[in-house]
Image: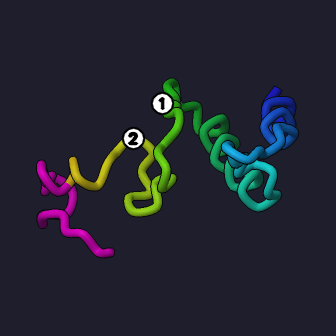
Amino acid sequence: MLEKLLESLRERPSSATVFNQYEDDNTLNNLRQFLDYLLKHRHGVLLLGEAPGYRGCRLTLEYLSQVDQLLENPCTRFSGRSAARSS
């Protein structure tokens, strides 16, 4: 079932207005490894975000976050320090 999903993602062609990042074997393999990990470790929930934006999570690497929101409402719970823009 997973391979069928991944192959379906790979087969979608890019166009003048839409880029399919999963046409690239490395990107598709990264997704495969991530989903394999989730399946093997029996996570009960998968949050799936659609259309991360025109910069494609370039700054945060988090699919469900936005840099401006992180800077406006810094969360120090994990690191003990405030967020700062690095680029």
- Count neighbours of disc 1 (C-alpha within 10 A) and say few if under 14, some if 14 to 19, many if 20 or more: few
Q: Is residue 31 left or right of residue 43?
A: right
| Element at label 1 | loop
Contact (Cβ within 8 Å) of mark 2 with mark 1: yes
Chief SS of the magenta region: loop
Q: Please name the residue that numbered disc 1 is placed on.
A: 47
Residue range in magenta is 71-87
Q: In the rendered structure, does residue 60 fall within the stretch colored magenta?
A: no
Disc 1 marks a residue whose amino acid type is Leu
Q: Residue at x 79, y 31 (%)?
A: 5
Disc 2 marks a residue whose amino acid type is Leu
The structure's colour scheme is: rainbow
Name the spot of residue 22 as percent of width and height, x first.
Answer: 75, 48
The quarter of the image holding the N terminus is top right
Q: Residue at x 82, y 58 (%)?
A: 25
Q: Looking at this view, is 41 or 72 the one in front?
A: 72
Query: Based on the displayed image, in which of its 4 quarters is residue 9 positioned?
Result: top right
Q: Please name the residue that numbered disc 2 is placed on.
A: 64
Q: Give the foreground label among 2 and 1.
A: 2
